[in-house]
Amino acid sequence: MTTPAASAPTATATGYGDGPRRLGYLGPAGTFTEEALFTQADLRDLELVEIRSIPDVLAATAAGEVDLGFVAIENAIEGSVNVTLDSLAFETDLRIEREVIIGVHLNLLAMPGTKLEDITRVVSIPIAMAQCRQYLAEHLPGVEKEDANSTAGAARFVAEHGDSTVAAIAPARSAEVYGLDIVRADIEDHPENATRFVVVGHDPIPAPTGHDKTSVVVYQRADVPGSLLSILQEFAARNINLSKLESRTTKVALGDYCFLIDLEGHIDDELVADCLRDIKSKHTDVKFLGSYPAASAHGETVRRDADVAWKKADTWIQDLRNQIDR
């Protein structure tokens, strides 16, 4: 099902090339994915395609059924979204082209007039349920839990069945979309909850901005003492900061692990390129998952300051080079 953005013009080139582009994302209407997507004006103006699950979004993008995919990859409370990581690391050749981070507030939604004591069953996606584990234990002990494909899908399920004993954990927007009451708001166990989403596709690597992130998968040559240390030393020697380091089984054998790494910088940066070159030459393999603009509250300021600093440094270098006796 295709859902164009409200008041959006026909999809046109918006930083991703010429002609209409199709972007697949986790539907239905009212998901956190949709909320995050709609913070990006250029993405919102593409032809938006609702897809029922994260694996289906990634599969459709890999197959070319949509040009871009937009999926969750990490949550501040529950950590990585494993299905996204595994697909990028082992199953597809998609690259990350952008990241988007939004604050996440989870709510208990039910049919109008429902009271907390009426609820005997809660429906949501596992990662959302896990983010409210403490609340459910304290306020709805023994409640039956049921998995859904998305938070909005859980809200739609409650609305369609009209059962006042069933509630959904979902965004506030889902209550508006499906005509539900917010029985309790902000039930996540930790108030500083946030989720990181990524745009994935087959497009060329975005140009460096001065405030970038690079994601890679590093495979070990052998499971021997010091193998991880030897990888980390390459980054430390070049003063490259790692914002994420996670081990994942390679799905080949027990004890066979690879490392998913997010680092500050762009593949176009000499230090980053030199570091990855050395790692690839010393270890079994490195899979490049993308270099892309880093999302942060001060990202635009950092990029602007970096651009000014680079121009000053370039002027300095050019002045010195002009003094060479040729």
Image (cartoon, helix red, strand yellow):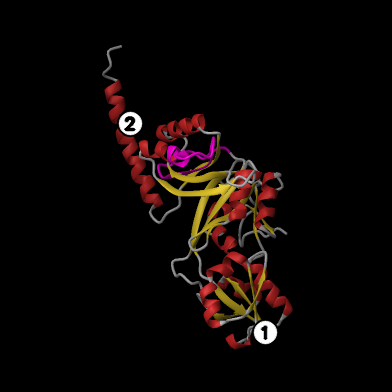
Q: Is residue 161 above or below residue 76?
A: below
Q: Is residue 166 left or right of residue 134?
A: right
Question: The N terminus lies in which quarter of the figure?
Answer: bottom right
User: Residue 59's spot in the image, x, y percent?
Assistant: 69, 49
Provide the residue designation for mark 1: 164
Provide the residue designation for mark 2: 314
Q: Specify the segment rendered in magenta.
A: 204-231
Q: Residue at x 30, y 33 (%)?
A: 313
Q: Is residue 51 above or below residue 241?
A: below
Q: Is residue 40 left or right of residue 316?
A: right
User: Residue 40's spot in the image, x, y percent?
Assistant: 53, 55
Question: The C terminus lies in which quarter of the figure?
Answer: top left
Specify whether residue 70 is painted magenta: no
- Other-residue count near label 1 (Cα within 10 Å), few / some / many at <14 / 14–19 / ≥20: some
| Residue type at tag 1 | Ser
Q: Secondary structure at mark 1?
A: loop
User: Can residue 26 be seen?
Assistant: yes
Q: Secondary structure at mark 2?
A: helix
User: Residue 163's spot in the image, x, y percent?
Assistant: 70, 82
Q: Quadrant of residue 9?
A: bottom right
Q: Quadrant of residue 152?
A: bottom right
Q: Residue at x 61, y 66 (%)?
A: 126
Q: Quadrant of residue 160?
A: bottom right
User: Residue 222's spot in the image, x, y percent?
Assistant: 54, 36
Q: Residue at x 65, y 82 (%)?
A: 120
Specify whether residue 226 is painted magenta: yes
Please name whichever residue, 222 or 86, is drawn nearer the observer in this view of the structure: 222
Q: Spot the residue most to the front.
A: 225
Q: How many marks?
A: 2
Please name whichever residue, 324 or 295, is drawn nearer the observer in this view of the structure: 295
| Residue type at tag 2 | Asp
Q: Is residue 3 left or right of residue 196?
A: right
